[in-house]
Amino acid sequence: MPTPYSVIHERLLSKISDYDILQFIDVEREELLHSYLISACVQFNRVCKVDLTARNDLLDEFNADTAR
């Protein structure tokens, strides 16, 4: 089952202490979170058991269930 990027974004927002990001308008916040996500995928891909390159940026989701 695909994992929407929004699930990952929500987890990130619950853990960060930079509360200024919450003041961004939705579009800007999503763009920033997407750039963080892609950067993290590149670095985490070496140790991850799920293929993080298998994603659909048009639908904003990973093809695999990454939210376990």
Image (cartoon, rainbow, N blue to C red):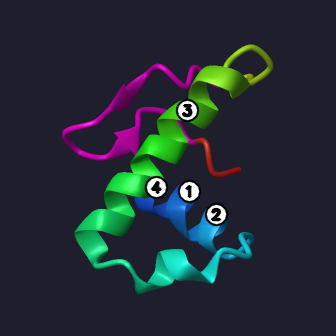
- In the rendered structure, the answer to whether residue 27 lies left or right of residue 52 reads left
Residue 43 image-quadrant placement: top right
Q: Judge left or right: residue 26 versus residue 68.
A: left
User: Which residue position holds label 1?
Assistant: 8
Mark 2 or mark 1: which is in front?
2
Give yes or no for contact between labels 1 and 4 (Cβ–Cβ under 8 Å).
no
Q: Is residue 57 above or below residue 22?
A: above
Q: Which residue is mark 3?
A: 39
Label 2 vs label 1: CA separation? Answer: 6 Å
* Marks 1, 4: nearer the viewer: 4
Instruction: Check whether the beta carbons of the residues at disc 2 and disc 1 lie within 8 A of each other.
Output: yes
Residue 65 rendering spot, x and y as whole percentages: 56, 42
The residue at the point 31 percent across, 46 percent down is: 60
Task: Please name the residue that numbered disc 2 is placed on.
Answer: 12
First-in-chain label (2 vs 3): 2
Please tell me which residue is depicted at 71% across the width and 27% down the height of the picture: 44
Q: Is residue 62 magenta?
A: yes
The answer to which of marks 1 and 4 sits earlier in the sequence is 1
Q: Dot 2: few (<14), some (14–19), or many (≥20) neighbours within 10 Å?
A: some
Q: Amino acid at mark 4?
A: Leu
Whether 60 is drawn above or below 27: the answer is above
Q: Residue furthest top?
A: 46
Residue 18 in picture, x, y percent from top left: 66, 74
User: Which element carries disc 3, helix, strand or loop?
Assistant: helix
Magenta-drawn stretch contains 32:
no
Marking on residue 33:
4
12 in relation to 22, above or below: above
Tell me the element at label 4: helix
Question: Is there any visible trace of residue 4 in the rendered image?
Answer: no
Start and end of the magenta stretch?
50-65
